[in-house]
Amino acid sequence: MKAERWLELKEIVGGALDLPDEKRAAYLDQACGRNAELRSDVEDMLRSHGLNGNFLETPAIGVLHGLSDSGDGQSWIGRTVGSYRVVEEIGHGGMGVIYRAKDLRLGRDVALKFLPPEIAETAEARARFQREAHAASALNHPNICTIYAVDECSGYPFIAMELLKGRTLSKEITAQGPLPIDRLLEFTIQIADALDAAHAEGIVHRDIKPSNIFITDRGQAKVLDFGLAKRALSEHRAPGTIEVDESVPGQLTRTGAAMGTLSYMSPEQSRGEELDARTDIFSFGSVIYEMATGEKAFPGKTAAIILDAILNRAPVPPSGLDCGLPTKLEEIISKALAKDRDLRYQHAADMRGELQRLKRDIESGGVGIAKERSGRRATRWVATGFAILALALAGSGIYFYSHRPAKLGEKDTVVLADFLNSTGEPVFDDTLKQALGVELSQSPYLNILSDQRVRETLGLMGRSPSERLTSDVAREVCQRAQSRAVLAGSIANLGSDYVIGLTATDCLTGDVLGQEQVPATSKEGVLAATDRAAISLRAKLGESRNTINKYSLPVQQVTTPSLEALKAFSMGARMVQESGDATAIPFFKRAIELDPKFAAAFTWLAAAYSNIGESGLASESMRKAYDLRDRVSDRERFYISAHYYDMVTGEVEKAHQVYALWSQAYPKDWAPWGNLAFNEAALGRYDHALSDVLQSLRLNPDSAACYANVIQLYTVLGRSDDAKSAYQQALARKIEPPGVHAYLYEVAFLQDDTEEMKRQVAWAAGRVGAEDFLFSVESDTAAYSGNLNKARELSRRAVESSLRNDQRETAALWQMNAALREAEFGEATAARKTMAAALALASNHDTQILSALVLARTGDLTRAKSIADDLSRRFPLDTLLNGYWLPTIRAAIEIQQRNPARAIELLHAALPYELGLPNPQFEVGGLLYPVYIRGQAYLELHRGYEAAAEFQKLLAHRNITQNGPIGVLARLGLARAYAISNDRTKARAGYQDFLVLWKNADPEIPILREAKLQYAKLQEM
Amino acid sequence: MGLLQGYLSLGLVIFRPMSGGGMSTLASEQVTQLLIKWSSGDEESLKALIPLVYEELRRVARRYLRRERPDHTLQSAALVHEAYVRLVDQRDANWQNRSQFFGVAAQLMRRILVDYARRRSAARRGAGDTNLPLNEELASPGQPDLDVLAVDDALNTLAKLDPKQSRIVELRFFSGLSIEETAEVLGVSPATVKREWTIAKAWLYLQIARGARREG
């Protein structure tokens, strides 16, 4: 076919497809004229179109996998459908999955509900679905979830609707049981009003049930899914067979949904009759019953029982369930639940009227109820009602007098927008936002969205991460990051004065949460004015006077009184985010030049140096920041002190105290808990570490590092199953830190699950950053069974992999791990050579420690001593260096010098730390090193029982030593210990144990040859 | 070290070195740079780009095809998105690179999947093949109800008549993109894509049906 011919064909086919069937023939007559060949081709195409059904609609990969494109596993996340970009899954609804999505045209967040394709399988069904959904979308009522649009993508119909925050009524009831009467009435009046409005438009819901009613965080009821129920119900009305099981987590399989619906059906609905608005009245009656009692009106385990109850039985009177309900409410429920629809309320409006009256009566003191019915029950209600009211009053009293109304919840974060600077003076750009940030970050009440999150969110929005946060952009960031409010500031001239304005806006509703304006008479007064405005706004947002008084040092004091220095500092802070630490350094230095007492600038300078690997300069700056720590806010002081102890001096206990204080003062901060855990783990206090890291995770459930640490701690504590389920939880949150796979590998190693080990290695293959880690861990496994050559090869690949990623320090650690292994296996030359290569890659605190250990174990004592002495001089207060590593290194030296008794004395210092996970990277060289060296010292002393005890300790802590060489060398040590104590049977068994494990080992390994000789000697005896 | 990164929020939380997920920053910078260069007319950079993207896609495709159970299925669009997120430095990403990326990825996905289908059909015919990187994972269940190879053949013919339609089919069928995503990649309206897609399907269906009849 020629190209022109094709164009013609396309044109005509396209035109024909736009026409209804009956008009096509005439169109073709005219379009094709007498060209019979063309006409025939066009008709072929049209026939083909009519026949091809779902041809090509399943993507190729699905076809090749032999699956049809099933909606259940369909992931829409990250995709664009219609004008929406799908962001994340937020739940399952009765009929499909609900996602949060961004409306790209209007810039607002919406909920997208995807329905199963069956709902619109045929053209007719599709049209009906569209018609009904469109009718529902015309409903505009505060208590009906607004439908914005109805559309479909690849055959999946979806509805775009209002994004609601809160939970469904069914969750509400599950979580807290019967609703308090005031809330119950509040909600039911709203729902009745919604039903009234829909019924007035001729729209019947047909599927009113607690999971279709949403209670927003603002206490508003919203009815969901108007106009969608009809088909779903008619499809699933096959009573009698399916079990009701709503309790299964993640239920909402289609069956579950249909069954959930069953309990709220009206009698006429269950008989399959024509329905009118009164079916909703009945279902609504069931819902109120459940709200009041916490129980279903028509319970039952099978569909048959439920249907029988709906058709033939009256529900258990709520009073029989001892809920202390007003009798009037019982009457309302009972009337709504009349089996005969002519006996029910005829209009939702009537029901609303009665509910409103009841509400008024209760609010005016319960008189109305008492009059209607006399007797015990009524009296009891009045008493209960009074108690509730009294409690509510008392509660609100306390609330009013000691708290302001808190406008921000526990987990709400706030986005800081850039200042709108209309003065034309650039010195205020960035500076005022920085000042405001410093002032606000003192508050334990406010939670400011971190710069990093802001940048990530901008990225997700397809914007440049360094885009200016105008209040519009900030609002979008706020919505996306699920923050609560935007705080926008402005500065303007007023004659020769300035006016600083601050506004906090709820980013979903646009409601102003608080506003403040403060004048400043001079440029110098601007910072102080910003400060006053911020403090006053904190109060308006609901922070208590108490914490405001405690945590509100003036910004000039906690940063700098120099606007110029603050400007340079702000620029630096911006550079860190935009172009990295190195580019920020000159700005921090400039800020320090302008104000040599600018503590925060020193802190940031230290951070920047540390992040580019200049640890010496970092320590120096951190030390200065620490000296100036009186000039920072409390929160910053915690940060500075903790890092000073952690980084500069290495004083674990002191850092620990700071973290503890920090977590008390700022209970919403997750970092101190994570760091507490880190320190506890270093000291071997794993239970504490676990509870701390879990706390950190509660405060920041998206932290990959926390998850990694949780998994690691479970493993060390021998709780492999918990480790695995923590991993599943992380995955469910779409978090998958690569390091985790090394931990899971260790779990599999401990459980002897070689298949799983392979899977973890396969996962990491090609993933730089995980690959090296797994190579190194695998090298340990190879060494564990004596395959030294294989271990060498794997270590080499680990090093290469790190280097490809430009991670020299990490590469050096893998190299050092290999060096230490060589040393312990008796390959002194190889050990020293490998160690030298590692030091050449990176010579730092960590690698120097390990190099001293390698030298000590291979007999190069002079160099070992000199490195150890140098470390001790440089880090005199470093807890783990002085408590764990130096005793171990010096004890190893003493063993070489034939002073094993002295070695044991030295190792006393390590006793409190020996079960810990100290830096440097503790998988390097294995853990429990002091124990191992002590065992060696006892062997030298020929004290077999003591030596055996040490090696037993190693074997008993297999969860900690994992696949490290220490774990296997301990077996050999144990055999020797028994041989020394002349326990030949155990010694023989010990050697056999080791030799069996090493049956495929490389034969030339010195310690293996030695072990074989010793074993042979033992056999001769 | 990275201990201090993130002012006032991050501390010494990380136990062991944990560098970024999957691709290194270097590689993702590289892909991003190549995309940028390519968009400014440097055709050479496309040559460098293709193997990087191909490898990544092949890896994710392999992972997908190896899965035994169809729950949690990763649809190919999700798969391409995953590759995109992993390969392209999100800091420099913009809508333009994104479209370009998807354009390249669709061609590569086609190549990967057609190779896969070819090997599978060879394997089914019992032909011994020694060098089949994808073949280990052939244990996938089910019989294809659509001949991907036939679509590929027909699509080659279509490409000669109507390159644009053939691109649309690549994006929709081989990459699994939606109408809107396809429109975004090609810079045309969704209505246009829909119309062209309908006609392309009709033509391909006809072509394949005729081919089958001839063979039969």
Image (tube, rainbow, N blue to C red):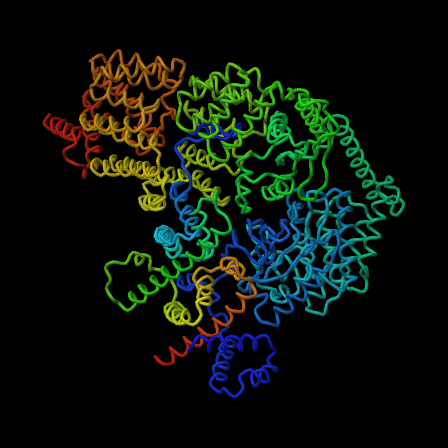
| Residue B73 left/right relative to A83 | left
| Residue A668 left/right relative to A764 | right
Quadrant in which the N terminus of chain A appears: bottom left
* Quadrant position of residue A335: bottom right
Q: Residue at x 34, y 79 (%)?
A: B215
* Quadrant position of residue A782: top left
| Residue A881 left/right relative to A985 | right
Q: Name the foreground residue: A196 vs A585.
A: A585
Q: Can you give x and y, in whole percent of width and height, for residue A937 in the image?
A: 24, 17
| Residue A293 left/right relative to A381 | left
Q: Can you give x and y, in whole percent of width and height, for residue A402 in the image?
A: 74, 25
Q: Name the foreground residue: A2 vs A912.
A: A2
Q: Residue furthest right?
A: A371
Residue A135 shows up from this direction: yes
Q: Name the foreground residue: A787 vs A601.
A: A601
Question: In the picture shown, does residue A259 fall above or below A717?
Answer: below
Quadrant in which the C terminus of chain A appears: top left
Total numbered labels placed on residues in the image? 0
Residue A243 shows up from this direction: no
Q: Can you give x and y, in whole percent of width and height, for residue B88 in the image?
A: 44, 47
Question: In the picture shown, does residue A715 fall above or below A143?
Answer: above
Q: Can you give x and y, in whole percent of width and height, for residue B147 in the image?
A: 39, 69
* Quadrant position of residue A469: top right
